[in-house]
Amino acid sequence: MNKQLLNRRQFSGRCAALAFAVPVSSSMSAIAAHAQAPAAGAAPKVHTVKFPDGTTVPAVGQGSWHLGQGKHPRSVEEEALRTGIALGMTVIDTSENYGDGASEQFIGRAIAGQRDRVFLVTKVEPENTAGNGIARACRASMAQLGTDHLDLYLLHAPVPASRLSDVVAKFETLRAEGKIRAWGVSNFNVDQMEALFKVPDGHRCATNQVLYNLKNRYIERDLLPWCAQHAMPVMAYTPLGGNNGSLVRDPSLAEVGAQRGYSAAALALAWVIRSGTVIAIPESGSPAHVKENAAALTMW
Ligand SMILES: NC(=O)c1ccc[n+]([C@@H]2O[C@H](COP(=O)([O-])OP(=O)(O)OC[C@H]3O[C@@H](n4cnc5c(N)ncnc54)[C@H](OP(=O)(O)O)[C@@H]3O)[C@@H](O)[C@H]2O)c1
């Protein structure tokens, strides 16, 4: 493929075309507003997102819900993850419950020898948060991942508001001990974020990981603006529409992307990260797909 960076005018044109093809309306203009033509010969700009503590990460990472569980041959999936890391998709997202720990184990093996290059994110299930459950779950995840610290530790789904202060206190203890660098939540709505910010240290939440893609834009109504107001980046899961491949096979995306040598997947990811405050975590166990996805990091 003759892949070329889109300059501002080209990106605007493609976005306008997409706005007719898929229900993206005004937000496509946001991409165009950020699009910049690179200076001749200059290295393409890698899009990044900044966490409240100043830590900056690439705006496209890698998910792992189904990895290490036989969807692809293990060696192929390992090559895919390592290819992604080499291409700059260094945020790796997993969870204690993905494949009952198989995903964490897979990642631990795949990143052996290059832990320092990776921003490692895993999650604790709400049912494991009582008593010393969070500390225990964190220890188990670190053992599976072969690391002595997590870069980001998320509560996978909301707990009742009455439990939030305890959960935050446990996260803060792990942070003080150096076992986690930051903590956050997942699948919280605005009311739940408000409740979180009312408990001591709740405002230290680094992110909220939620569903977001071209065909699931529900969070734009209130959660995305809320997070922006609180200077909190969002992690977008299922950015390609998930296993049914609805976006990667979208003919309009494919047509617009093909005009400049990008895949539908890369275009869908570029759309998700367009604001500069969203990190997309597409999953792939295919090295070829990972290469396509990495193109979103520098598309415009
Ligand atoms: N916090 C939560 O509650 C939550 C919920 C869901 C997901 N997540 C996280 O988000 C990650 C991503 O979400 P997801 O797995 O639901 O969906 P996704 O990333 O939107 O889509 C994954 C699917 O797209 C395919 N794919 C990837 N790149 C492709 C490409 N360039 N061309 C064609 N197909 C491509 C993958 O197949 P191949 O492997 O064959 O490429 C896979 O079937 C998960 O792995 C997980 O880490 C979090």
Image (tube, grey):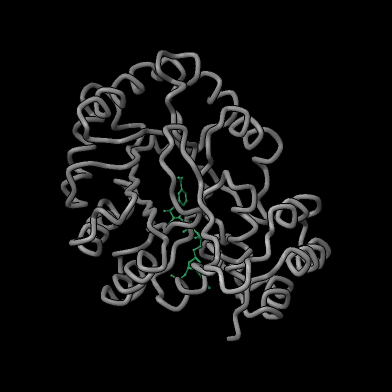
**In this rendering, position of residue 203 left or right of residue 252:** left
Is residue 11 something that shows in the picture?
yes
Task: Please identify the residue farthest to the bottom as the structure is shown.
Answer: 1
Work out which quarter of the rendered image holds the C terminus and state it. bottom right
**92 versus 268 height, above or below:** above
Task: From the top left corner, tell me how far across and down residue 295 is, in percent.
Answer: 53, 69
Task: From the top left corner, tell me how far across and down residue 129 is, in percent.
Answer: 30, 28
Q: Residue at x 78, y 66 (%)?
A: 9
Question: How many numbered badges does the structure rendering display?
Answer: 0
Task: From the top left corner, tell me how far across and down residue 25 is, in percent.
Answer: 81, 53
Q: Residue at x 67, y 43 (%)?
A: 218
Which image quadrant for residue 118? bottom left
**In this rendering, position of residue 1 left or right of residue 132:** right
Is residue 246 something that shows in the picture?
no
**In this rendering, position of residue 139 left or right of residue 46:** left
**53 versus 218 height, above or below:** above
Which image quadrant for residue 131? top left
Observer-nearest residue: 174 or 137?
174
**235 versus 247 height, above or below:** above
Which image quadrant for residue 105? bottom left
Task: From the top left corner, tell me how far across and down residue 116 is, in percent.
Answer: 25, 53
Work out which quarter of the rendered image holds the N terminus and state it. bottom right
Q: Residue at x 77, y 57 (%)?
A: 23
Q: Residue at x 45, y 71 (%)?
A: 290
